[in-house]
Every structure is written in C-alpha cells, then in structure tokens.
C-alpha cells in the first residue's frame, strides 16, 4: 500500500473512529479540549507510523491505545505518578493500571460517546457553535471541511470551536449524561444540532450549490449513532426517520447542471428506496415507543406521506395539512404555518392556501424569509394572477443568498412575465 493510499485510509478511519476516541479520552481527562488534542496526537502518530509499518488490523483500537498512553503520560507529568494512576484505576473500577484497564475502557465507550454528544450540544453554546463542535468532535471533520460546509472562513470556524471549548470549561460543564430533570431539554438541544446540520446540507442557505450532500451524510450518521445510544427515545427515532426519508430524494432534487428540481417535478423512481425503508422502520419504532408524537416524529409522518405516494397526484394532502396543524399546535411557528398553507392549497385549492399565506405577510420572523414570497408567487400563478406572481418571485429572488435558488426564482418570474397579463 503506497503512502498516499495509507493517508487516505488514515483519513477514513479518523472520520469513523474520532468520536469514539475523543469520547473515551474525555472520560479519562474530563476535558473535551484536552481530549481532542490527545486524539489529534494519535492521528499524527498514525500518519507517521502507518506508512512505515502498515495499517494495523484494528486501526480504531490503535488510535485509542496511543491516545490513552498520551493521556496517562500527561497525567503523570502534571501530578505524581502513583496518585493519578491510582485515581485513574479507581475511576475504571480497578486498583491499578493493568491490562484490565483496556477491557474496562472499551466497555465504557458507548456511554462515553453519549456523554460527548451531550457536552458538544450543550445549550450554553450557540446553535452554530454546537454544530461546528459536534462536526469536529463526533463527525471527524477538519476545521477546513467545516468551513467549506458552512461557506465561512477557516479562521472563523477555528475561533468558534476554540471559544466553544473555553465556554464549556468556564461553565464547568460536567462530562455526563444529564439527569432526568434536564434530560428532555438537553436532548432537544442535541436533536436541534443534528437537524441544523442536515438542513444546511439539504437546502444550503448560501453559495452556488443548492445542496451539500456531505453535510446530510454527516447528520445521518450522527442520527443513526444516537439511535443506537438512546434506543428508547421516540424523538430520536423520529428525527432519524425524517432525515432518512428526506435524504432519499437527494439524487432527484437536482438536474444535470445542479439546478433545483422541486418536489412535484422530481422523478420518484430516483428516490432511494433503501433510505425510505429505513426511515419508515424508524418511524414505526417511534410510534411503538408510545407517547405524544414530538415535532420530529410529526415531520417524519409528513415526509412519509410523500414517500408512499408513487406520483404527486397520489399524495394525501389532507393528511399532510392535518399533520401541519398538529405540528403548529405543538411548536407554534410562522414557518410551520406557511408549510400548512402550501398543504392546504393542494388539499383545498390555491385560493384557500393563498388566504392562509397572505395572513403571514406581517409576521416579523418572515420579513426576510424568501420562501414566503416564493409560496405567494406559486399560488398567485396557479390562480392566473401572473403579474402579481412575477413580483413575488422577483422579491423572493432578492432575499435568498443561494445562487441556484435565485436562478430558479428568476426563471419562474420570467415565465410569469411571458403569460397573458393579469
């Protein structure tokens, strides 16, 4: 295996194993920042050693072993060897640093991963800081990759990650799974971060591409990981179901030149049936666990309505409208109401949808939200009011920062201009 191939292998292993390595080390040193530094040391060691000696049979375990040794060395340097090694042994259920250390360490990794997720997604951090830190610690992405994903500078991302670690340290955020009293709120924060990462990949807010599929894949991987770590949480399965079904449309959402293809114009034969089956299975699991469906499970139910329809005409829009109404009661939001207006327009006609959408025109939260005039333009066009529709599409185009979406909106405006004047 050549050096370039070894380096690619190291990168692939790091993407898969970095979260586990950092989680295990954080459990030892009780400091996320230090744990990442130790894991990075192990990564550098792999880049230096594997080209000479070959890739080990269990590369993840190799990284963990090197990281543990560096952690123990660091503890020995800071304080006396006997006291710190004894404490480390007691923390792991033993009296001293012996081969049993490894078995105890491996047995704790899944718990440590869950702890790391809750720390990286702690509400003391801003949503964008949580997303960057999560992608760094659990997604295995470099600062450069995160910057490219969010279309910002590497320096900005580096500062966000550094400040996030400093904030966690200053707030003395414990490396633990929250207790019952805080668990629901903290889990909401975790789910929000994964959802944010997916959405930025699914419908990019800025840039030249409408989608950034790599971010969707990172979010999917995190959602699946969380399913394994928290199998009894319905909303975890609800979020996974939503992301699986949404991701199933990826190949059909853009044309040959990267241009957007809207839902009802997509070739449904290109939807990924394996992802749909995974999503529906996760939704069944969420239902089986019982309780009132949460916002992610409700959105997954909506996505499932689309996934089950072989053609746009077979879509159960009445059910989708009812689900949006339920979602609006659970988490009141003008964006949810706008989606409900679209569903109502398909269920009861464009005039009914337009009435609901018009009522949102004064919502401050939607003042610069490009999808409001986009929806208004679509409904006005369906009603034959082409001049009004053109103005709405043009207004929407001025509000989006995504070049692909802007081009689509301007094309729709031009199409309206070519129609008979209304």
Image (tube, rainbow, N blue to C red):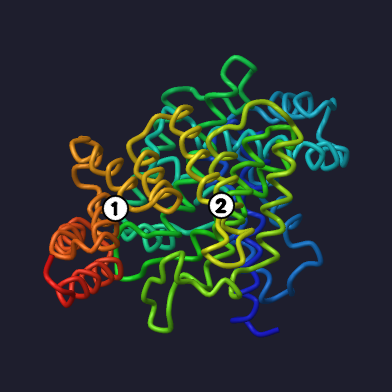
Mark 2 or 1, nearer chain start: 2
Q: Nearer the viewer, residue 263 or 58?
A: 263
What is the x, y in percent for residue 383?
Answer: 26, 59
Name the image quarter holding residue 297. top right
What is the x, y in percent for residue 61?
Answer: 76, 55
Q: Is residue 272 left or right of residue 98?
A: left
Task: Tell me the residue that label 2 is attached to.
Answer: 316
What is the x, y in percent for residue 177?
Answer: 64, 27
Report helix, strand or loop for mark 2: loop
- Residue at coordinates 66% horizontally, 61% vertically from top-left? 275
**Where the N terminus falls, by quadrant?**
bottom right
The correct choice, above or below, for 281 with respect to 185 in the image is: below
Q: Is residue 180 left or right of residue 346?
A: right
Q: Is residue 95 left or right of residue 281?
A: right
Task: Tell me the residue that label 1 is attached to.
Answer: 371
Name the image quarter holding residue 356. top left
In front of the other: label 2 or label 1?
2
- Residue at coordinates 61% horizontally, 37% vertically from top-left? 26
Local crowd at mark 2 within 10 Å, few (<14), some, or many (≥20)? some
Q: Nearer the viewer, residue 398 or 94?
A: 398
């Amino acid at each position: 295996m050549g050096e370039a191939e070894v380096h690619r292998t190291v990168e692939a292993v790091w993407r898969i194993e970095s979260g586990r390595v950092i989680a295990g080390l954080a459990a030892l040193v009780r400091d996320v920042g230090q744990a990442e530094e130790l894991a990075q040391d192990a990564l550098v060691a792999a880049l230096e050693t594997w080209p000479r000696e070959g890739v080990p049979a269990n590369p993840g375990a190799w990284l963990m072993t090197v990281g543990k040794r560096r952690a123990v060395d660091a503890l020995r340097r800071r304080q006396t060897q006997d006291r710190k090694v004894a404490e480390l042994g007691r923390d792991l259920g033993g009296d001293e640093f012996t081969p049993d250390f490894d078995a105890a360490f491996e047995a704790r990794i899944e718990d440590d991963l869950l702890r790391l997720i809750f720390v990286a997604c702690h509400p003391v951090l801003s949503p964008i800081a949580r997303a960057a830190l999560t992608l760094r610690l659990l997604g295995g992405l470099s600062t450069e990759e995160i910057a490219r994903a969010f279309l910002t500078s590497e320096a900005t991302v580096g500062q966000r990650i550094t400040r996030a670690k400093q904030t966690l340290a200053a707030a003395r955020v414990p490396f633990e799974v929250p207790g019952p009293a805080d668990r629901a709120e903290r889990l909401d924060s975790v789910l929000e971060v994964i959802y944010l990462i997916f959405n930025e990949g699914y419908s990019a807010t800025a840039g030249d591409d409408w989608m950034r599929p790599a971010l969707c894949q990172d979010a999917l991987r995190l959602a699946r990981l969380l399913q394994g770590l928290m199998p009894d949480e319905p909303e975890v399965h609800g979020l996974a179901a939503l992301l699986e079904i949404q991701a199933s449309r990826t190949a059909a959402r853009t044309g040959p030149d990267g241009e957007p293809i809207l839902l009802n114009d997509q070739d449904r034969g290109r939807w990924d049936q394996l992802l749909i089956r995974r999503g529906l299975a996760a939704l069944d699991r969420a239902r089986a666990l019982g309780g009132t469906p949460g916002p992610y499970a409700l959105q997954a139910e909506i996505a499932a309505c689309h996934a089950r329809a072989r053609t746009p005409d077979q879509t159960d829009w009445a059910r989708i409208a009812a689900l949006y109404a339920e979602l609006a009661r659970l988490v009141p939001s003008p964006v949810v109401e706008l989606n409900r207006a679209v569903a109502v327009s398909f269920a009861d006609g464009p005039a009914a949808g337009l009435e609901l959408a018009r009522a949102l025109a004064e919502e401050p939260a939607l003042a610069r939200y490009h999808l409001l005039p986009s929806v208004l333009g679509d409904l006005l066009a369906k009603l034959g009011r082409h001049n009004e529709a053109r103005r709405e599409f043009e207004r929407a185009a001025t509000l989006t920062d995504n070049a692909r979406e802007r081009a689509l909106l301007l094309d729709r405006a031009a199409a309206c201009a070519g129609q008979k004047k209304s």
